Image (cartoon, rainbow, N blue to C red):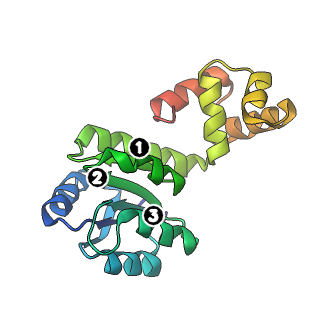
């Protein structure tokens, strides 16, 4: 992500859905829409060539579906984050396999989109990885280092190291501040 601009691509076979997402995303000055693509094959080609920060991706499309596009993104080791936008709930588990950043049901509300974009910006700015976010979630539930270690199958010394790193990355002084930070930025 360069200079706080989030380079974004929309891939959906429905013109109406693309236009609606574009209108919603135009409310966010940090979002730069690089392209709106209706053809899945052209979509994956564009994503591979341009490696956007975010890809808003429909699941059910003719030819190649969104899950297959996610497979291509992973296979090409791209750092693009995927937000699935679909009318179908039943793909959510499969989307998790491809480390989807989020899974939103159509029609997407502006408030939900605002939360997702804020969470994305927080994650990128603080550079938290999945394990660190998992630990923040457990801290937010009131777990101590020993309990976190047990749940994540790591040593409590490793958890303490993660805690120090997380506090440094988030610029929080203690667990209470961290929980407030996580809540405010929709990390938990």
Tell me the element at label 2.
strand
Q: Earlier in the sequence, mark 3 or mark 2?
A: 3
Residue 49: x and y, percent? 45, 82
Q: Residue furthest left?
A: 16
Q: Eyeballing the image, is 21 above or below 185?
A: below
Q: Which quadrant of the figure has residue 151?
A: top right
Q: Eyeballing the image, is 35 above or below 21?
A: below
Binning the other alpha carbons within 10 Å of mark 1 as few (below 14), some (14 to 19) or many (20 upward) gives some
Tell me the element at label 1.
helix
Q: Which quadrant of the figure has residue 116?
A: top left
Residue 113: x and y, percent? 31, 45
Do the CB atoms of the residues marked 3 and 1 lie less than 8 Å apart? no
Of the two numbered discs 3 and 2 in the rendering, the one whose residue sits closer to the viewer? 2
Specify the label residue 129 is tagged with: none
To which residue does mark 1 refer? 118
Specify the label residue 86 is tagged with: 2
Is residue 170 among the parts visible in the rendering?
A: no
Q: Alpha carbon of mark 3 to alpha carbon of mark 2: how far?
A: 20 Å
Is residue 142 among the parts visible in the rendering?
A: yes
Q: Residue furthest top?
A: 142
Binning the other alpha carbons within 10 Å of mark 3 as few (below 14), some (14 to 19) or many (20 upward) gives many
Q: Residue at x 78, y 28 (%)?
A: 150
Q: Residue at x 65, y 25 (%)?
A: 139
Q: Alpha carbon of mark 2 to alpha carbon of mark 1: how far?
A: 20 Å
Q: Alpha carbon of mark 3 to alpha carbon of mark 1: how far?
A: 14 Å
Of the two numbered discs 2 and 1 in the rendering, the one whose residue sits closer to the viewer? 2
To which residue does mark 3 refer? 53
Residue 185: x and y, percent? 47, 35
């Amino acid at each position: 992500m360069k200079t706080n601009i989030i380079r974004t691509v929309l891939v959906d076979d429905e013109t109406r859905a693309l236009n609606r997402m574009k209108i919603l995303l135009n409310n966010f000055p940090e979002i730069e829409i690089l392209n709106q693509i209706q053809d899945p094959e052209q979509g994956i080609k564009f994503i591979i060539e341009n490696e956007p920060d975010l890809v808003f991706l429909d699941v059910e499309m003719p030819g190649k579906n969104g899950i297959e596009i996610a497979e291509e993104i992973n296979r090409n080791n791209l750092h693009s984050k995927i937000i699935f936008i679909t009318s179908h709930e039943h793909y959510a588990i499969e989307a998790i396999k491809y480390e989807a950043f989020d899974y939103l049901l159509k029609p997407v509300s502006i408030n939900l989109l605002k939360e997702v974009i804020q969470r994305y910006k927080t994650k990128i700015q603080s550079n938290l990885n999945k394990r660190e976010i998992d630990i923040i979630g457990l801290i937010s539930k009131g777990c101590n280092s020993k309990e976190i270690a047990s749940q994540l199958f790591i040593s409590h010394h490793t958890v303490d190291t993660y805690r120090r790193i997380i506090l440094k990355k988030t610029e929080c002084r203690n667990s209470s501040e961290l929980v407030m930070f996580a809540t405010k930025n929709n990390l938990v």
